[in-house]
Image (spheres, coloured by chain):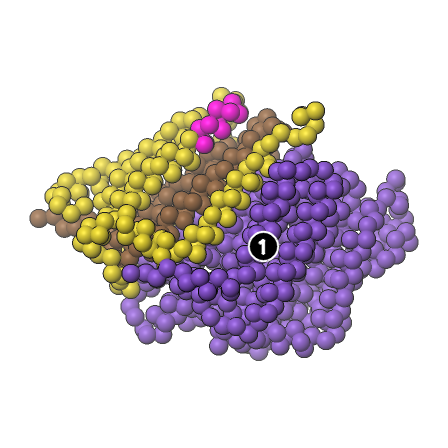
Chain colours: A brown, B yellow, C purple
Amino acid sequence: MLPEIPQDLYYLLSAVLFTIGAIGVITRRNAIVIFMCIELMLNAVNLSFITSGNFLNSLDGTIFVIFIMAVAAAEAAVGLAIFVLIFRLKGTVHVDEVNLLKG
Amino acid sequence: MIGIGLGFKWFIFVVMALTAVGASIIMVTRKNPIHSALWLIVTFFSIAVLYVTLNATFIAVAQVMVYAGAVMMLVIFVIMLIHLEWGARLGHKKSFPKLIGSIITIILFLQILAGVYTYSNTGQHGIYTAQKLAEIGNTRAVGTVLYGKYAFAFEIASILLLVGIVGAVLLARKRKEQER
Amino acid sequence: MDALIPASEFRWIVPEMILTGFGLVLLIMGCLTRGPVASKISGVLCIAGSLFALIFTVKMWGMNLDIFNQLYTIDNFGTFFKSLFLAILILVALVSLRYADREEIGGGEYYALLMFGVLGMMVMTSSHHFVTIFIGLEVMSLAIYVLCGLLRSELASVEAALKYFLLGAFATGFLLYGMSMIYGSTGLIDVVDLKKYFLMKQPFSATMFIIGLGFLLVGFGFKIASVPFHMWTPDVYQGAPTSITAYMATGVKAAAFGALIRVFFTAFIPFQFGWSEIIWVLAVLTMTVGNITALVQRDVKRILAYSSIAHAGYILVAFITGDRGEASSMLYYLMAYSFMNIGAFTAVIVVQRKGDNTSDLDSFAGLGARHPFIALCMSVFLLSLAGVPPLAGFMGKFYVFSTAVKAQYYWLAIIGFLNSVVAAYYYLRVMMYMYFREPIGEAAGAVDRAPQYGLVMLICMWALLHMGIFPRTFIVMAQKAVGIFG
């Protein structure tokens, strides 16, 4: 007899996805790919919220996820406008010259 | 997911979890942004299926529509629009900050693992059990809470979307010099 | 069944509604009309709207209630910050009346985004519910991502927007993950509920909770620009239009600190052992890195950017103590800091020329002889930033460090004091350029004089002198504001 799927596994999956996304943000150079990695991180967060909500019998997590989705959509609009703008000026969306990690 | 055998649920979970992880790893490592985008959509779909196993059917549908539908459409549209020169300049520069950043991220991951390992389901429990959700319907329950308790946040979110739209138009419209 | 919103509760959010209403009107105006006149009218409308909102906000002083099913709170802490944001908005809009026209970024949308940004800050600091805090934070951030990139033909500005956007979204991911872990371990996403939960000693997964706190700190640390999440600050502050830099340096920092203080001082004081040591290290690093790097900068905007990092470190010094009564020192400091920075950035705007977003030290050379008033104002702001009595900057530092001493963080106070000594060097260096250097090249005489700038600088100067010489009123106000944590 199998047990119910423990929530630890969902949290683990969420952590793995979050880490993959974070490493992608740090190592990739294409702004659009970086943006996609951030979306992946947000999805990992959503998964963790839904998991908690399900196992705590609460809908607050679900509501939070709806708002995160709204934010992700709005961020996508603004972010992609910025990418288009920088592409017009520089002809590339590589972030080498912008160098995210250097002050 | 009431009424489905546990074995099948495990099967779905394992397959979808592995797909999500695999597709996201491929997504991060692809050189062509279009491929990355398509693999990310695969990840989003498998996460949507996982939401169904977590009794969150409404979010599963919203996930497909908002992420896979709207956000990724926009991303692919922009990639097409600006003809990414993905063939050029692919040499991977090893840089010290990136290495440090990755190591820090791995450390963070181990921390999360510690959190998950010691996790116990002891928090404050709510009233929306799986049975109750199935009774009143997931979408209805979510709607009641969203437009009831969370109506204020919903209103602020409308301003958020407005700022997003206005901002995007303001940034991406052509400059005056080009109009002349 | 969850209750819907009673209509009577809307009278508590009149300032927010005024801001939204004026913002919408400005957006419509922006669609219909263009040109300098329309831009001026938009600016005046923006100032008028903010003044209205400020009046209604101040009237709410002393109120203390939760509205909209605990999602929003009217209390002195929120009212204090709301008034501060509206004051910042008025000053920035005044500056923009001239600056936005000069750089051709004005128009209804510009002012509307300024107002929506402040709306986000207000929502963020006057709620103890994670959902509302997060939405407010995002409204503010989105508006600022756009405003940063408004100089659309200048690469530095667009790159600033790109950098701020990517790192901001990245940090949001961490903030959300932190919230999700706190939710996962306790089942609550409301700070006041969390406080009650801990008081009743209910069980929760401690490890996951503490890690969640850490992630929350990362998210907020990015917004307040504390080391090691400060990498974006200099480039973004330098690249953004200078009026927006003033807005970001003051508004965003105050809002992020407001939310951080509310979240941590309401519920997480019992876990001070978990975060105080980490923040101790962060505060020392933030002060030191900010000040040391500022020493070698040649661009005044960059110097001010690094100095703003250092100031975040000073404020963190008081944050570490976890002393709920003395949290007022942070509020006082933030208020003083806002006026100093808006003043200093206004002076930078005056010295900058049209279409040139840089502000090399050389352009300040000889300013004392050519434009004594501007040089005097800038000197007051710089001295206040350096912490020279009797200006507000001194009182703020004194108050913050004495909080650390009271809580027996002697080393921290000493390091903070040493840091402000180091910092004096680069502030005085700018003053030296103004008074003891000959003007270089064609820069001589080319400043952008306008009554709006003079007005803003006079207001800031008056505020700094008043807060420095008669700090009592303001300190009492700040103490009443933090009374909610008691």
| Residue C344 visible at all | yes
SS state under label 1 = helix
Under mark 1, the amino acid is Leu
- Dot 1 falls on which chain? C
Q: Residue at x 26, y 39 (%)?
A: B49
Q: Position of residue C391 (x, y in %)?
A: 74, 69
Against C47, residue A35 (above or below) is above
> Which residue of the protein is positioned furthest toward the left in this rendering?
A1
Q: Position of residue C331 (x, y in %)?
A: 60, 68
Observer-nearest of B111 and A80: A80
Q: Which residues are magenta?
A: B74-83
Residue highlighted by disc 1: C19
Observer-nearest of C284 and C404: C404
Specify the quadrant that holds the N terminus of chain B.
top left
Observer-nearest of A50 and B132: B132
Specify the quadrant that holds the C terminus of chain B.
top right
Q: Quadrant of residue C257?
A: bottom right
Helix, strand or loop for the magenta stretch, by majority: helix
Q: Residue at x 91, y 54 (%)?
A: C369
Q: Position of residue B159 (x, y in %)?
A: 50, 48
Q: Position of residue C48 (x, y in %)?
A: 67, 56
Q: Residue at x 49, y 33 (%)?
A: A32
Q: Quadrant of residue C110?
A: top right
| Residue C321 visible at all | no
Q: Residue at x 89, y 45 (%)?
A: C445
Density class for disc 1 (Cα within 10 Å; few <14, some 14-19, many ≥20) is many
Observer-nearest of C339 and B122: C339
